[in-house]
Amino acid sequence: MINKDTSVCISLSSRPSNFGTFIHNYVFEELDLNFIYKAFSSDNLAGSIEAIKNLNIRGCGISMPFKEEVISYLDHQDENVKLSGSCNTLLNHKNEIYGFNTDFYALNKLFEQYNVASFKNGLIIGSGGVAKSAAHALLKHIDEIYLLARNKNSALKLIGETNLIHKNDNFSSVDVIINCTPLGMSSDDDLPCKLSIINNAKIIFDLPICNKANKLKLKAQEKNIQYISGSKISLIQAHKQFEIYTSEVCDLSIYEKAFKAFKAQSL
């Protein structure tokens, strides 16, 4: 039951979804923790950070477009934020804001699990905050990484911070594909790159969350290409956020159970 001692966690985004709200609250209830999580839309990051401090908000998930901008409001940064230049999780401790990058954590964990270092090269599609995390995490495993992005300014900025090789889509051979664009959040979305590039991949990490099979997943299945969905990445990063918010440890299987419940009620 919510009371005066309930710890409040929130998320900030220009376009909030129900994913984090459902998943975290499911786990809080499952473990009988006096926490609540609520997603908010905001176009005023400075005011939102001030509210987090003034209202003693315990933790906050940061989504687009704030993952880079929020760094200037941090009192402390973890190593993943320093390395990637992107932050997606805040902890308010004694009115000081600690920043973490659980996207980086989740991606690096999956890259290790799927032995990405055994592949020759990789492709990052997109150049936003998630792409920055993906690029820096992938650079720990592969040296030859290409970038495919529509936004020239953010692409050039990302290239300046890394050793990525900017490419248009006239190449066809790459082992690892990481889709960091919104394309794929809907099953009707177009493919994020040319089909010829997809067909030659060995493994695909598709970061958007889609409850139905999107076109990229269907093409990967058709060609028998190993496919890792955005939901798996999001579960690992949400599980890490839970530890940061609550200082508790729980098994990943509880978050997997929460995701199944989320998927069932979304159908």
Image (tube, rainbow, N blue to C red):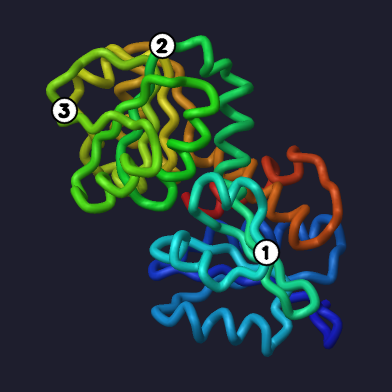
Q: Is residue 176 above or below residue 186?
A: above
Q: Residue at x 56, y 42 (%)?
A: 104
Q: Quadrant of residue 31?
A: bottom right
* Disc 2: CA contacts within 10 A as few (<14), some (14-19) or many (>=20): some
Name the residue tied to disc 3: 169
Residue 158 percent location from the top left of the image: 34, 45
Q: Are marks 3 and 2 in contact (CB under 8 Å)?
A: no
Residue 92 percent location from the top left of the image: 72, 72
In this view of the protein, can residue 115 be seen by the observer?
Answer: yes
**Which label number is shown at residue 120?**
2
Residue 33 percent location from the top left of the image: 85, 65
* Disc 1: CA contacts within 10 A as few (<14), some (14-19) or many (>=20): some
Marks 1 and 3, the one that precedes in the sequence: 1
Q: CA distance from mark 1 to mark 3?
A: 39 Å
Q: Nearer the viewer, mark 3 or mark 2?
A: 2
Q: Residue at x 67, y 53 (%)?
A: 78
